[in-house]
Image (tube, rainbow, N blue to C red):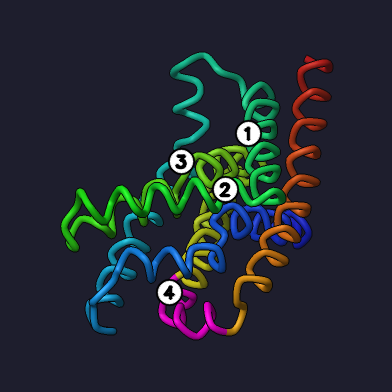
Amino acid sequence: MPELDVIFNAFVTILVTIDPPGLAPLFLALTPGMDRKQRMQVASRATIIGFAILTLFAVAGVVILSVFGITLPAFRVAGGLLLFFIAFEMIFERRTERKEKSAETAITKDHIRNIAAFPLAIPLMAGPGAISATVLLSGSFTGASGHLTLVAILAACLILTWLTFAAAERVDRFLGETGRSILTRLLGVILAALAVQFVADGIKALMSA
């Protein structure tokens, strides 16, 4: 079983890439006119779909890479650069603008029953950043116990996301525009540091190979 610091770093990485506080206002924007029961149905379905997708990459991510002839160190470098780009967007608030555009498109094109799958589950919850982070972390969680631990971390992060959706109205009112901006930037800085570590570890592994 991985050490506690590895588990904690994995939890922080996945939680930051999913960004539950940043999804709260978008969840409200995607569910206008719905009562609480309907919103919870959308939140539950999106959480289940997001969990299924991320679990697939947690368990079979390395196998998927091997099919395309991609080594894990190479993916660490590429994934780290992608996570750094996402962190850059978070710090300068470009990610929020991009997510809002995805939400606006979905409202006009999809029915309520499809909103949970797109764009809430994909790409807002299980997007490129979260998928890349999951595949990268799967290299540190080997074996059956390691896979179970990583799946448990994913479940914990997505349960927190579901709880954020359940309290979306309160969270949005509590944080406000300024609070969301500060929190997003802070999480972006943390993610940038984690991304640099992924790149450094990948380069080190490539050089030693």
Q: Are marks 2 and 3 in contact (CB under 8 Å)?
A: no
Task: Please tell me which of labels 1 and 2 falls first in the chain.
Answer: 1
SS under mark 3: helix
How far is disc 4 from disc 3 in space, using C-alphas? 24 Å
Question: Magenta segment, which residues?
Answer: 162-173
Front tag of 4 and 2: 2
Task: Please tell me which of labels 4 and 2 falls first in the chain.
Answer: 2
Task: Please tell me which of labels 4 and 3 falls first in the chain.
Answer: 3
Q: Would you name the residue on which mark 4 appears?
A: 165
Q: Are marks 4 and 3 in contact (CB under 8 Å)?
A: no
Can the viewer see residue 194 in this picture?
Answer: yes
> In the rendered image of this protein, does residue 147 appear above or below residue 204?
below
Q: Would you name the residue on which mark 2 appears?
A: 95
Amino acid carrying mark 1 in the image: Leu
Q: Would you name the residue on which mark 1 appears?
A: 82
Q: Which residue is painted at 24% across and 83% down in the image?
A: 35
Q: Give residue 45's quadrant in the image.
A: bottom left
Quadrant location of the N terminus in the rendered image: bottom right
How far is disc 1 from disc 2 in space, using C-alphas? 13 Å
> In the rendered image of this protein, does residue 134 appear above or below residue 164?
above
Quadrant location of the C terminus in the rendered image: top right
Pinpoint residue 162: horizontal percent, then vertical percent: 43, 72
Amino acid carrying mark 3 in the image: Phe
Front tag of 2 and 3: 2
SS under mark 2: helix
